[in-house]
Image (cartoon, rainbow, N blue to C red):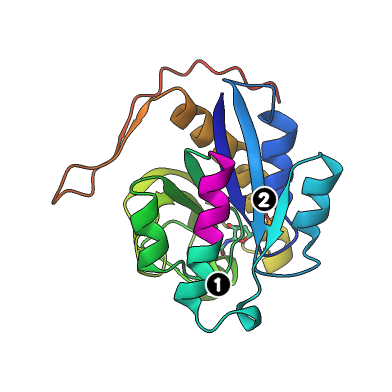
Amino acid sequence: MFKIAVLASGSGSNLQAIIDHLHGLVAGIQVAVVVSDVPGALALERAERADIPTAVYPLEAYVDRETRDQAMADAVEASGAELVVLAGYMRLVTPGFLERFPHQVINLHPALLPSFPGEHGIEDALEYGAKVTGVTVHFVDPGVDSGPVIRQETVSVHDDDTPASLGTRIHALEHRVLPRVIELFARGRITAPEQGSRRVRVDDDETSEIIW
Ligand code: GAR
């Protein structure tokens, strides 16, 4: 069994892709808990529908971010998760949280980092006039979308794209890339960078149990 925790703030379409293509289906992967900072987030409903335990940690309920993140880390640890997946979790996690899960926290971003970090990766790439953008999965460090890259895949920007049309293609790609990276983790095929390096080794033999 390879247990994962998913952190999500919003609609949770990426969580849904994980549930539909991995949870209980591939490489012993189980979503052990879904954690959100937003009470009522659609991601929580999706988890409940799949009988996955949920937990909510709104910042207002804690004295500060560090205290909130320690409570969140306790829940993740108690779930037995070996990998923490930020799938539309729109907050920075604190260094104290990351220290609890070294090289075990990954994030999904809707642009080719280091271009267009932050909350508006799709709109920012479009406004900049980029002709190619894409999807990045990376290890999380204390910065904003600044950790070592695990996998990137590209999307062409069309002249007549709007944030919605480009977003549709980016999200469709995300729904394939993130489950695939999680599968590779579960199969022990991703090696975190050595001290002083940012280079992640991904031993992708192109075989997959995922059925799309
Ligand atoms: C995804 O596009 C993800 O890349 C983005 O939030 C969306 C969540 O969608 N994350 C970031 O921008 C992080 N900087 P979802 O809730 O439908 O999975």
Q: Nearer the viewer, mark 1 or mark 2?
A: 2
Q: Residue at x 58, y 68 (%)?
A: 90
Q: Residue at x 47, y 70 (%)?
A: 92
Where residue 11 appears, as percent x and y from the top left, is: 75, 59
Where residue 123 appears, as percent x and y from the top left, is: 59, 71
Q: Is residue 102 left or right of residue 194?
A: right
**Would you name the residue on which mark 2 appears?**
34
Look at the image and tell me whether residue 122 can be seen.
yes
Residue type marked 2? Val
**Would you name the residue on which mark 1 appears?**
119
Q: Residue at x 54, y 72 (%)?
A: 68
Query: Is the residue 119 above or below the residue 200 in the image?
Result: below
Region in magenta: 72-80
Q: Residues within 10 Å of mark 2 (few under 14, many from 20)?
A: many
Q: Is residue 44 left or right of residue 154?
A: right
Secondary structure beneath label 1: loop
Q: Is residue 76 magenta?
A: yes
Where residue 36 appears, as percent x and y from the top left, is: 66, 62
C-beta proximity under 8 Å, tags 1 and 2: no
Image label count: 2
Q: Residue at x 71, y 64 (%)?
A: 10
Where residue 175 appears, as percent x and y from the top left, is: 65, 42
Picture quadrant of residue 203: top left
User: Which corner quadrant holds the N terminus?
Assistant: top right
User: Which corner quadrant holds the C terminus?
Assistant: top right
Q: Nearer the viewer, residue 206 or 12?
A: 12
Comes first in the chain, label 1 or label 2? 2
Distance in Å between CA atoms under marks 1 and 2: 21 Å
